[in-house]
Amino acid sequence: MSKSLLGLEASNAIVVGAGQGGGRGIALQLARAGANVAVVDLDAGRAEAVAAEVREIGSESISIAADATDATSVAEMLARTRGELGPVRTAVNNVGSYGSHRPAGFVDLEWDFWQTAIDLNVKSTFLCSRECARSMQDDGVDGAIVNIASLSGMRASPNLAPYGAVKAAVMHMTQTLALELAPRGIRVNAVAPTAIESPSLAEGISPEFMEALRESIPMQRLCSIEELGDCVVMLASQLSRFVTGQVIACDGGASVTTRRAEIPPGEGHRESPGS
């Protein structure tokens, strides 16, 4: 597929939470589609490492260390991107996790788990979407915002109630924002992947649960970081120019089967944000 067909060549994208895993895959696939990419992560070193990979592909890239849960940091992130690359056409919000909390049954949860999940998923998506939408309106750009949700927001998530609930909130926010921004030519969609094949996932769960995850997916494998990136590229590109307010399941068919790998209490915790 030619870059001109996608309509992303020489455009500017910002990927928040792009220092590792799925965010890295999104940044690299946008670069392969011809976009320049601002790589944003809480960790400056990780952000620069991915930005260097983007530049090796042949696109322009800057790295930005920013806290997506802090309004001032998010505003500075957009200002720097616009100042160094130019108007933002594609914005991807990939920050999302539940911090270092370990999955647990609902009756065993403490509020801190819920607050962490809200901050890392709902607050970050709100702040970044708001600032990106403002910049697109100010610059007169017909842009695309893509939020990263999760299959956990579409189906019940035993032992992960906070994460499932906040990802459902991200989906609802996506639809409301799509309605509000459609008259301004800005599209807003979300991708809901199943578990993403990455080192951080493997570090947090047992080999037995990893195998159970694979077996629960009709395609018998997890989502790769490149496949997540492909889905984002599709929604960001002009091929989806009449698509807005949608949640696309990037899950190998998991959402249409009754099979479910229930995460055991205590497994699957993550030390750093990343959907």
Image (cartoon, rainbow, N blue to C red):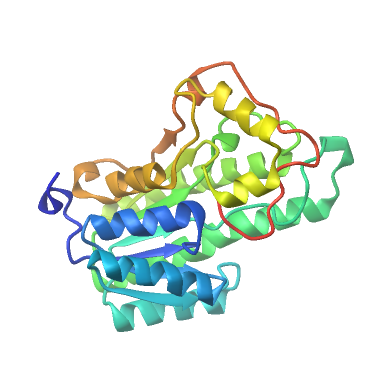
- Closest to the observer, 124 or 138: 124
Q: Considering the image in quadrants, where does the N terminus appear?
A: top left
Which x, y percent locates residue 194? 52, 36
Res. 255 visible in picture? yes
In the foreground, 251 or 80: 251
- Residue 33 at what x, y percent from top left? 23, 55
Quarter residue 96 falls in: bottom right
Q: Is residue 199 above or below residue 124?
A: above
Q: Residue at x 66, y 49 (%)?
A: 203
Q: Nearer the viewer, residue 153 or 179?
A: 153
> Does residue 74 sit above or below 114 in this rendering?
below
Left/right of residue 76 with respect to residue 187 in the rendered view: right
Residue most extreme to the front: 207
Residue furthest right as drawn? 108
Name the residue: 58% across, 16% down.
258
Residue at 53% x, 60% y: name it.
126
Q: 171 and 84: which one is in front? A: 84
Dividing the picture into quadrants, the one containing residue 50 is: bottom left
From the viewer's perspective, tell me whether residue 211 is left or right of residue 125: right
